[in-house]
Amino acid sequence: MAWTEVIELSRCRDGAGTFVELAGLELAVFRLREPERVVVIDNACPHASGNLSGGEVTESRVRCPSHEWEFDLDRGVCTQSPQVTVQRYPVEIRGGMVWVDLPD
């Protein structure tokens, strides 16, 4: 794994997802509140590759806009089917930038 600068925190939409393509990966960056944090997951829903960064965010969950599968962003687990998951990445905020630990 390698820490990689991904996006300026100020460019991340509050309470919503932001799409980022980096190092051959499509990522969804979520800036969440209560508690304030940033979560980064793979952008593609495992069901039918729906765009998770474009999904509706409620508290700490995102709903896939394609088929309405819902994922707990803090765990990366589908709320309807816990055996279905999305890849979550470790995140750090450094100097106003979002950094993510990505695979080499």
Image: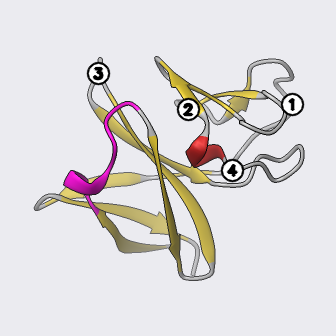
The alpha-carbon separation of the residues under discs 1 and 4 comes to 20 Å
Report whether 49 appears left or right of 24.
Answer: right
Q: Amino acid at mark 1?
A: Gln
The 10 Å Cα crowd at callout 2, few under 14, some 14 to 19, many 20 or more, is many
Q: What's the mark number on residue 35?
A: 3
Q: Amino acid at mark 4?
A: Asn
Q: What residue appears at the point 34 percent right and 43 percent down from the top-left corner? A: 13
Helix, strand or loop status at disc 2: loop
Labels 3 and 4: the sequence-earlier one: 3
Q: Quadrant of the C terminus?
A: bottom right
Helix, strand or loop status at disc 4: loop
Q: Which residue is mark 2?
A: 73
The 10 Å Cα crowd at callout 4, few under 14, some 14 to 19, many 20 or more, is many
Labels 3 and 2: the sequence-earlier one: 3
Helix, strand or loop status at disc 1: loop
4 vs 2, front mark: 4
Q: Which residue is mark 1?
A: 83
Report whether 75 appears left or right of 101.
Answer: right
